[in-house]
Image: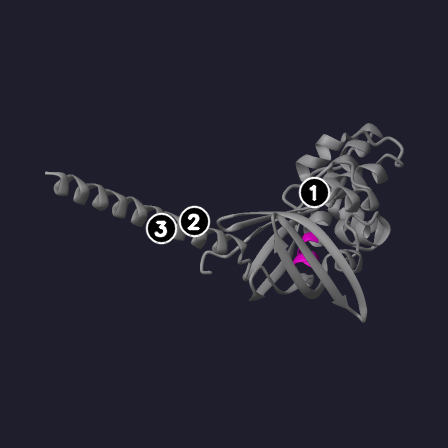
């Protein structure tokens, strides 16, 4: 009887140890998987608010134009520029990276911003014409024809040439995001050492990885230098393609 009890206890201990070991291996696997950032990640930098604010500021200087920032925001939606960030792990929690703004994405975003601005401009122009007693047609096509007759170019081309810069220049974005070098990840802190055009610069970011998403935010010191008001502003949320 005593031997049977002893064997039962040993069996239970063995099972408990096996389960605990399996659980620890599972946690270890998840932890190492979470720290491995290898692969290509993509982020969409939202330019909507900045573009709307630039357009609004410019329109305020035009006499007789009544428009709100919210109204312009209704025209300008989902204006984003894509950034690619690629990690290649070469040792535990460290490796190399490449980051770049996609020029074609910037061009598409810039074009979309001015097309949205042009739609708002045509509507405001039609209102001004009616207020001035203009008796002709003021639909979108008619106003576009008047703009072309007056300036010798389309509304979009006119705003691109004579209006405000709705987005930061591609060079500005590239100077902020482009680069390559090495990285280290530890305890939720990602340190990227840039080596670009012969210069060295380190960038420290907080990071959270959740499945196919990677959230990067700047630390307090970097935030102060960059002029942001939030304590930990999100720089970008990167998503890994489903195929990876």
Which residue matches tag 2? 27
What is the magenta range? 105-109
- Circle number at residue 21: 3
Numbered disc in front, either 3 or 1: 3
Residue 28 position (above or below residue 117)? below
Q: Is residue 114 left or right of residue 19?
A: right
Give the CA distance from mark 1 to mark 2.
41 Å
> Which of the colour schemes (rainbow, by chain, secondary structure, one colour) is used?
one colour
Q: Position of residue 244 (x, y in %)?
A: 47, 60
What kind of element bears circle 2?
helix
Q: Is residue 28 magenta?
A: no
Say whether residue 41 is left or right of residue 15: right
Of callouts 3 and 1, which one flags the residue occurring earlier in the amino acid sequence? 3
Q: Position of residue 172 (x, y in %)?
A: 80, 56
Q: Earlier in the sequence, mark 1 or mark 2?
A: 2
Is residue 226 in view? Answer: yes
Marks 2 and 3, how far apart in space?
Answer: 10 Å
Q: Which residue is mark 1?
A: 48
């Amino acid at each position: 009887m005593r031997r049977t009890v002893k064997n039962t206890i040993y069996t239970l201990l063995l099972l408990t140890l096996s389960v605990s070991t399996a659980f620890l291996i599972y946690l270890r696997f998840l932890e190492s998987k979470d720290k491995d950032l290898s692969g290509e990640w993509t982020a969409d930098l939202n330019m909507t608010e900045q573009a709307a604010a630039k357009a609004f500021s410019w329109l305020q200087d035009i006499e007789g134009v009544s428009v709100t920032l919210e109204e312009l925001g209704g025209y300008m939606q989902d204006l984003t520029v894509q950034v690619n960030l690629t990690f290649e792990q070469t040792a535990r929690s460290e490796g190399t990276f490449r980051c770049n703004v996609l020029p074609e994405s910037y061009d598409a975003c810039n074009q979309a911003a001015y097309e949205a601005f042009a739609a708002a401009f045509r509507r405001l122009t039609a209102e001004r014409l009616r207020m001035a007693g203009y008796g002709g047609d003021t639909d979108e096509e008619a106003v576009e024809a008047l703009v072309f007759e007056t300036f010798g170019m389309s509304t979009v081309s006119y705003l691109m040439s004579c209006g405000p810069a709705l987005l930061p220049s591609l060079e500005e974005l590239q100077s902020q995001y482009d680069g390559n070098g090495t990285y280290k990840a530890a305890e939720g802190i990602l340190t990227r050492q840039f080596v670009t055009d012969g210069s060295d610069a380190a960038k420290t970011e907080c990071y959270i990885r959740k499945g196919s998403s990677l959230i990067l935010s700047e630390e307090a010191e970097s935030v102060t230098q960059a002029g942001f008001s939030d304590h930990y502003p999100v720089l970008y949320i990167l998503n890994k393609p489903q195929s990876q």
